[in-house]
Amino acid sequence: MSFHYTNSLLTIIYFKQNSFMARYILVSLFMLNQLGISYSQTTELNDAYEVICDTIYEEVDALPVFEQSEAGLSQFHSTHLFPILSDYCTENDTIITTLTYKLYLSSLGQALHVEFQSDIKNRLQRRLRSKILNFMPFWKPAIKRDENVCCVFTIPIRCLKLE
């Protein structure tokens, strides 16, 4: 399979085994697009399939739904993000009471990219982003005009109490 990546078309590669390298490729290609850098390469990827997001919607007819419900999303945050935040706060003698991030989802419901809206250090952002991209389960995708679409939306986490 070959792929081409250009400014006007965001082509995302998913490896069937959700490997770190697949996620690295996803994030790298997405960031190139955000920076306005055109990139074109041809390669054979036997263990991959291709998903194309030519548009990432902010407004959709039906928002994506976390497959394990809203309580499941809170549990995901508690299990995967709060330990990182707690360690960071302890190491840096600081308090983080609010965390807000934009989550980019594919038309299949896979987390593609995370942008933090909160003012947190790059090192912490990298650790949180890695957890979200590597461990977040699939969502039920957003719908626009009766089709699954790629989307971006904001997830606020307020009143964090880290022990």
Image (tube, rainbow, N blue to C red):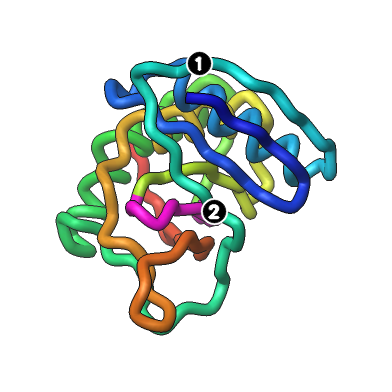
Q: Residue at x 43, y 52 (%)?
A: 106
Residue 148: horizontal and vertical position, in percent? Answer: 36, 66
Residue 145: horizontal and vertical position, in percent? Answer: 41, 83
Q: Residues within 10 Å of mark 2 (few under 14, many from 20)?
A: some
Q: Residue at x 74, y 41 (%)?
A: 6
Residue 140: horizontal and vertical position, in percent? Answer: 26, 61
Q: Which mark is residue 160?
A: none
Per the image, the residue denoted by label 1 is 44
Say if the magenta span includes residue 99.
yes
Q: Report the amino acid beneath label 1.
A: Glu
Against 74, is 23 above or below?
A: above
Say if the magenta span includes residue 83.
no
Q: Report the amino acid beneath label 2.
A: Cys
Q: Residues within 10 Å of mark 1 (few under 14, many from 20)?
A: few
Cα distance in 3D space between marks 2 and 1: 20 Å
Per the image, the residue denoted by label 2 is 53
SS assignment at label 2? strand
Return the residue nearer the eye: 82 or 150.
150
Bounds of the magenta segment: 98-109
Residue 19 appears anywhere in the view:
yes
SS assignment at label 1? loop
Q: Residue at x 31, y 32 (%)?
A: 135
Residue 86 appears anywhere in the view:
no
64 with respect to 44 (left or right): left
Lower sequence index among marks 2 and 1:
1
Quarter of the figure that contains the C terminus: top left
Front position among marks 2 and 1: 1
